[in-house]
Image: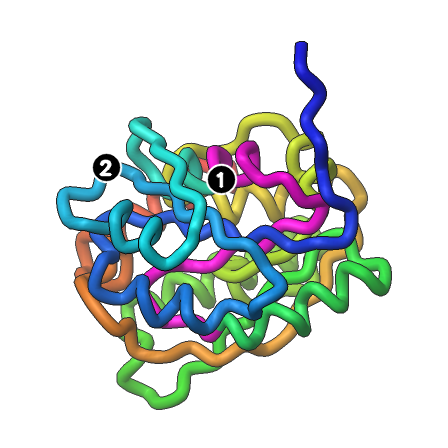
Amino acid sequence: MTETHVEPDSVTVVIPCRDEAEALPAVLAAIPLEYHAVVVDNGSTDDTAAVARVRGATVVREDRPGYGAAVQAGIGAARTELVAVLDGDGSMDPADLPGLVALVRDGADLAVGRRRPVHARVWPWHARLGNHVIAARLRRKYGLPVHDIAAMRVARRSAMLSLGPLHNRSGYPLELLVAASSAGWRVVERDIAYRPRTGGVSKVSGSILGTLRATKDFLAVLR
């Protein structure tokens, strides 16, 4: 078996995408120059993969549907020890990544972003309420110092792989936090900006049905 060469000091940014061709150019342009982008195309019907390649990102195809499946494929494809994850819809600012990276380099096992909306209309009430309920349960049941479900996060690739396969759909960020708690990881939360998405429609917060489906996945993880 060929040994994978992993660069210890660099950062890979994994961006799971499904039909994000409109927003992706600006997201990739905002990633710090010293970071490498891996775009995971999770069944897009638009030009997501082509847009990513033209802008210098590595493209990984993941045919299994689901956010978690896409993220785990991207982590597996990373060739750096530090791995960051953020959405490809433009709602999170890649300029917030270095702050999370610094927390991991300073000793945190997992650094997560707490989304702070730039204005009230960014985060629909139903999505905000669901997030509040889930985060409160994470604090009570698992002792995790979080107020969000880790939409943006940074950790060491080897550590994330050591947790084994996690939830393939929307429950992935939540199951990652639960697994981190069980493994005794030091989890640190830091505020990040949460902005209107710059293209397309959210698969979760874009509708009440999408939020309910995600919440169902979350609750299945917390049983």
Bounds of the magenta segment: 72-93
Residue closer to the observer: 151 or 40: 40
- Name the residue at 64% across, 59% down: 139
Q: Amino acid at mark 2?
A: Gly
Residue topped by disc 2: 43
Label 1 packing within 10 angstroms: few (<14), some (14-19), many (20+) = many
- Name the residue at 54% across, 76% down: 95
Residue topped by disc 1: 74
Residue closer to the observer: 219 or 112: 112
- Name the residue at 57% across, 75% down: 96
Residue closer to the observer: 195 or 121: 195
In the rendered image, the vertical position of residue 143 relative to residue 172, given as above or below: below
- Position in image of residue 109 (x %, y %): 76, 52
- Mark 2 falls on what kind of element? loop
Of the two numbered discs 2 and 1 on the same chain, state the one appearing first in sequence.
2
Q: Amino acid at mark 1?
A: Gly
- Residue 112 falls left or right of residue 90: right
Q: Which quadrant holds residue 10?
A: bottom right
CB contact under 8 Å: marks 2 and 1: no
- Name the residue at 30% across, 78% down: 196
The quarter of the image holding the N terminus is top right
Q: Which quadrant holds residue 122?
A: bottom left
Is 88 in the magenta? yes
Label 2 packing within 10 angstroms: few (<14), some (14-19), many (20+) = some
- Residue 153 falls left or right of residue 23: right
Residue closer to the observer: 67 or 156: 156
Is 120 in the magenta? no
- Mark 1 falls on what kind of element? helix
Q: Which quadrant holds residue 199?
A: bottom left
Is residue 38 visible to us here? yes
Distance from the alpha carbon under mark 2 to that under mark 1: 14 Å
